[in-house]
Image: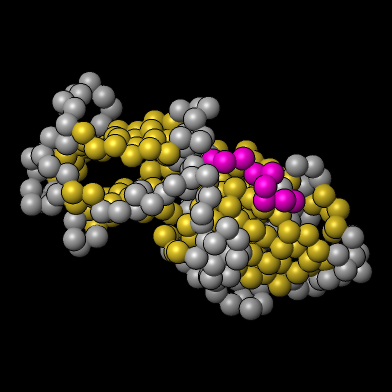
Amino acid sequence: MMDYSDLWKTLALARGQTVELDFGALQLQVHRGLQDWHLAHETITGSDEKLELRVHDAPFDADRDWTRWILDEKIDELRFQPQLPDRPIIVRPEMPMCLMPKQSVQLFIGLPIWLSLIFGSRQEQAIEVPSMTLSNSWFGPFTEGELCYALKTTAKLRQHELKQRAHRAVFALEIKNASSEKLKFERLCVRPQFLNIFQGESRLWTSKGRVSYRGEENWSRIIYASGPPGFDHAEKMVGRARDSMKRGSLLRTFDSFKQRVEI
């Protein structure tokens, strides 16, 4: 069970203090100087379950690889805010899947969280820090596809099969085969920029998604909801979607056919 209760609170730092955060695979430090703030971060493999926030007065380590911001010296507040990646993500189920006609399935997918650093009472965003490094990939035909991130994860049929990873939020996607043909696919293209983030009792969740496949030559209905997912008492919104779905957008969800949206 992950306790995020302190992670989204505003922190007041005195000069010379450092915030250290272990957020799953992400290890992050923020140091406040006189008028400057410094950030250092790295990814540590094998630490997916770690979630710890500390503020201390350790001396500034000038030998580290820091990024630096110059801010008004009166600004002493820092807040972390969760975001989802800014590009579509390609996800592979545990094995190639074939959904028979008129059948449906719900998949649970762990999506990586990025952390925004918000400074001061004006809530100014300085930077977004990915909790893990994602490789680039291409989804769809060469002339019509789009640049995506590739995610080393598996879509699960049952939520309890998902491992506890502090730096991921669970996305529940319902797939319905409303056609009279088999739906075969090996990869899914998920668009996290349309999803809100909610805090549950045991982990982070996103709003839900639903796709209704109506055949390769017909329209398929794709919806990303905005409300709570209905799992794990995840009702408190802690991160907002980057964008809202636009009516008439051309999208691809499976690697075998072209999707269009009707909402």
Report x, y in % for residue 21.
Answer: 34, 37
Q: Which residue is nearer to you in this view: 145 or 255?
A: 255
* Left or right: 143 in relation to 199: right
Q: Which residue is nearer to you in this view: 216 or 225?
A: 225
Name the residue located 38 percent from the left edge and 38 percent from the top edge: 52
Counting labels gives 0
Q: Is residue 113 above or below residue 219?
A: above
Q: Which residue is nearer to you in this view: 98 or 250?
A: 98
Report x, y in % for residue 143.
Answer: 66, 55
Name the residue located 18 percent from the left edge and 61 percent from the top edge: 121
Q: Quadrant of residue 260?
A: bottom right
Is residue 252 in the magenta section? no
Report x, y in % for residue 190.
Answer: 62, 56
Furthest-top residue in this view: 63
Stretch in magenta: 157-165
Is residue 161 in the magenta section? yes
Image quadrant where one finds the C terminus: bottom right
Q: Which residue is nearer to you in this view: 156 or 35?
A: 156
The image's colouring method is: secondary structure
Q: Quadrant of residue 173?
A: bottom right
Report x, y in % for residue 244.
Answer: 50, 70
* Left or right: 195 in relation to 9: right
Name the residue located 13 percent from the left edge and 35 percent from the top edge: 16
Name the residue located 43 percent from the left edge and 39 percent from the top edge: 51
Q: Is residue 145 above or below residue 35?
A: below
User: Can residue 89 be seen?
Assistant: no
